Amino acid sequence: MSMNATVRSLVHPQLRSEPFQPGLALKLSIGTLGFLNTLEFTEDSTSRADLGPYEVEIEARAWGLSFRGLFVSLSRPDGDDFGVCGIRTTYGIMRTYPRAPVTLVSKIPDTLSFEAAASILMPGITAYYSLIEVARLRRGDKILIHSASGSTGWMAIWIVEMIGVEMFVMVGFDDKKKLLMDNFGIPANHIFYSCNTTFAQGVMRATEGHGVDVLLNSLSSDGLRASWDCMALFGRFIEIGKADITSNATLPMAGFARNISFAAVDLHHVAQCNVDLLSALLKSAMELVASAATHHPSPLHVYSVSNVEQAFRYLQGSKNSGRIIISRFNAAATYVVSGGLGGLGGATIKRMADKGVKNLILPLRSSPASQAAARVVAELRDRGVRVETPACDVSSASELSAVLDGYAGSMPPIKGCINASMVLQDAIFENMSHAQTCLDFFVLLSSMPRSPRSALKLSSGPWRPKLARALSIAADDVQQSKQLSNYGVDSLMAVELRNWIARDFGVNVAVFEIMGSSRIAAIGALIAQKGDMKDGWKMRSEIGCII
């Protein structure tokens, strides 16, 4: 029966869900088109291929969502898997290690977080190309921007203000109107609603019958044709929507008698057919951002990778303003790091800030007295991270609970904890509510072992659960003193274990070495030795947790 089950598992692999783990090459896929609840991160086989001579691999920290991605997930894939063909990194294909030609990679300005950069990239390029390159927007023009509270509309407004053009905008709801008035000071009589086509009459009245010289359109059907009626002589109509183009809809031709031009902007097509143009657009857009002439869309709706389905459903509602971002870390969350200003703890919180964390609570027995600790806090705050350093003994359940309760109303929910201090009592969890314990992770850091022998014992921690899963047993049942044959490992399972070792540790181990009489500890030592372990200290990243 064991052999039959093994063969079936190899011929018909069973889906197994695991927590999202950093360092793995993954891509976002959808199991069944049209069902957002089947979104999942799966292994990305393309990462195994060698890099091309002019190709760059990027460790993605944040991804911006678009209606194109939603369209793909709800209907049919355009290109491979969940993304699109062409220049993948630019189009935000959700891979943890995307690749792109070096000409399509740009350094993020130091003033931007990864989430802010992801929110700017596509909308910024679209707005720049549409208004500067295609519409040739210039001072003295009048412009109408559809979906102005969205990410592309937001970036277009910044460009319009930079040039100094009279602007009219379209929104769908009152809250979006207020958002634009509060952030840009746009007069109420320059804001129109897109719920019906009467906006065209309002635009013509506001322009005293002149119409607008440039129109950035994302409406379709009757909305598009009503917008077409708002054009002034020699106007430039820029279509960034896709619905009417895809359906091959008609357009009244009489407008062209007034020297009105109609142009469509599709960056997906640009990426496929004109990489040099896309590279130039990327450079120009990032120069604008670096010069502080533009700012990222607001608000940013940041979701963690574990909530990617909720992010798509929010986008599907079509009521969002700003930009929806998927981040490795949830910026709208708080992380608790005890001992966070020590050597290892300090390095940890800096790394977390690099990954996009914006809220940290660092419980300390006393205020950060050392200059080094004070510098770390100041550096993080300068980067826009909210850092709180309450005096607290984390070994006291009541004291820690009181501190965390004090921040419950003023900071986002706690989504992760890292213990880099010496003592943390288990009783803390008994006093926490369910909402407080709904964490994305909880990490306990151990001190550096004193000897290579201790290092070998410590290194068994990371791979023990993986070996247990491969053997279909509990992690606690894995005993290093036993042989794998004691757990029913046969030749077929040995092949699977060999493949797993090669994939995760980069080490080739023969089947007979797995099937032999060696204990599990000896096989682990063999993997470490083949992984260039030196004097018990230098190990491959997966088998060793000493850095």
Image (cartoon, helix red, strand yellow):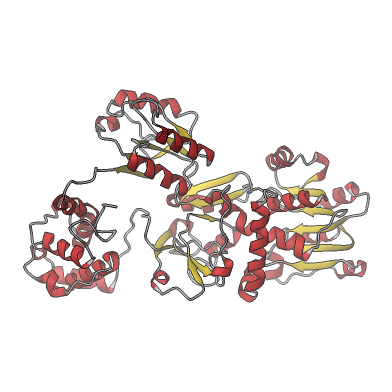
Vertical side of 272 occupied by 283: above or below? above
Position of residue 399 measured from the top left corner of the image (x, y, whole percent) = 33, 23
Vertical side of 129 occupied by 395: above or below? above
Vertical side of 201 occupied by 423: above or below? above
Position of residue 227 measured from the top left corner of the image (x, y, whole percent) = 81, 58
Side of 407 where 515 appears, left or right: left
Residue 14 found in image quarter: bottom left
Residue 468 found in image quarter: bottom left
Q: How many marks?
A: 0
The residue sitting at the left extreme is 517
> Residue at the spot x=21%, y=70% of the render?
498
Q: Nearer the viewer, residue 199 or 433?
A: 433
Position of residue 152 measured from the top left corner of the image (x, y, whole percent) = 67, 55
> Residue at the spot x=47%, y=75% of the render?
52
Taking the image as drawn, is residue 221 in sight? no
> Residue at the spot x=44%, y=60% of the render?
96
Taking the image as drawn, is residue 50 in sight? yes
Side of 447 where 121 appears, left or right: right
Residue 139 found in image quarter: bottom right
Side of 393 where 204 appears, left or right: right
Position of residue 189 measured from the top left corner of the image (x, y, whole percent) = 83, 41
Quadrant (top left, top right, bottom left, bottom right) of the N terminus: bottom left
Q: Nearer the viewer, residue 543 or 74?
A: 543
Vertical side of 290 occupied by 490: above or below? below
Side of 361 where 16 appears, left or right: left
> Residue at the spot x=18%, y=70% of the render?
493
